Image: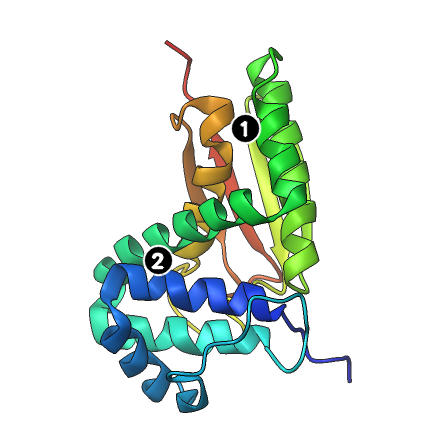
Amino acid sequence: MGKEPQATAKAFRTFLVGLDDVIGVRGTEQLLRRGGLAQYIGNYPPSTEARAGYRLRDFSAVTQALFDVYGARGSKAILQRVGRAQASRGLEESASLVVVARAAMKLLPLHQRVQMVLESSGRALAEQVDVVVRVTRERDEFYIELEQCPYCIGWENSAPVCFSMIGFWHRVLQRATGGTETIEEVACCATGAKACRYRVTLNPEE
């Protein structure tokens, strides 16, 4: 059996703080209790790169609890905001994502900018969580494939659930596209897929 996929302390902390910002500290406490993670109430991980038992399935447990409390529609809005907050904090703190932001400012054709940002942000994400990220392009659409997505490990659902990642990709692409792209999860491990897959459709620039 392989090693349990983990995240850095900073990554899990950022996720919890993002939830605090959207639903409040008491709301996050409720999710932690419901997800069997009460040990983190008032005891968030430090903002370090340590991988000391912060399991990817803990992200999933909190996400499932969120769906139980707020339903699919409410959870979608909350998680997209959390994902954007995670990316924003990453842009402030991660050297890799700072490079992404600077690269996006260069005067490159749109598709080249998007390819560069997606590949660089995928590498930055893999530095924080034990995921495998692949980016491909098919004509005018990009696809992001994510193995071991932290938001749906050990979860079965009838529809895709990884809205945090959609918010994350929107925010990291914002400087490259102006936020005009459409992102949808077209395959999800929660529905039985081998990897989560996101389609990025670029809308024409004004």
Q: Secondary structure at mark 2?
A: helix
Mark 1 vs mark 2, foreground winner is 2
Residue drawn 24% across the image and 65% down it = 23
| Image spot of residue 89 (x, y percent) | 48, 50
In front here: 107 or 137? Answer: 107
37 lies above or below 90: below
Point out the tag, 1 or 2, that comes first from the N-terminus.
Answer: 2
**Horizontal side of residue 55 vs 182, given as left or right:** right
Residue drawn 37% across the image and 82% down it = 32
Q: Secondary structure at mark 1?
A: strand
Q: Give the quarter of the image for residue 10.
A: bottom right
| Image spot of residue 41 (x, y percent) | 38, 84
120 lies above or below 28: above
Q: Give the quarter of the image for residue 47.
A: bottom right
Assign the N terminus to one quadrant of the image. Answer: bottom right
Residue 74 visible in this rendered orientation of the protein: yes
Which residue in the protein does label 2 denote?
A: 79
Report crowding for label 1: few under 14, some 14 to 19, many 20 or more residues within 10 A (C-alpha). some
Measure how far apart labels 1 and 2 are at the Cα level: 24 Å
Which residue in the protein does label 1 denote?
A: 141
Which kind of residue does numbered mark 1 sit on? Glu
**Horizontal side of residue 199 vs 160, given as left or right:** right
What's the coloring here?
A: rainbow
Residue drawn 30% across the image and 71% down it = 67
Which kind of residue does numbered mark 2 sit on? Leu
Assign the C terminus to one quadrant of the image. Answer: top left
In front here: 147 or 49? Answer: 49
Label placed on residue 59: none
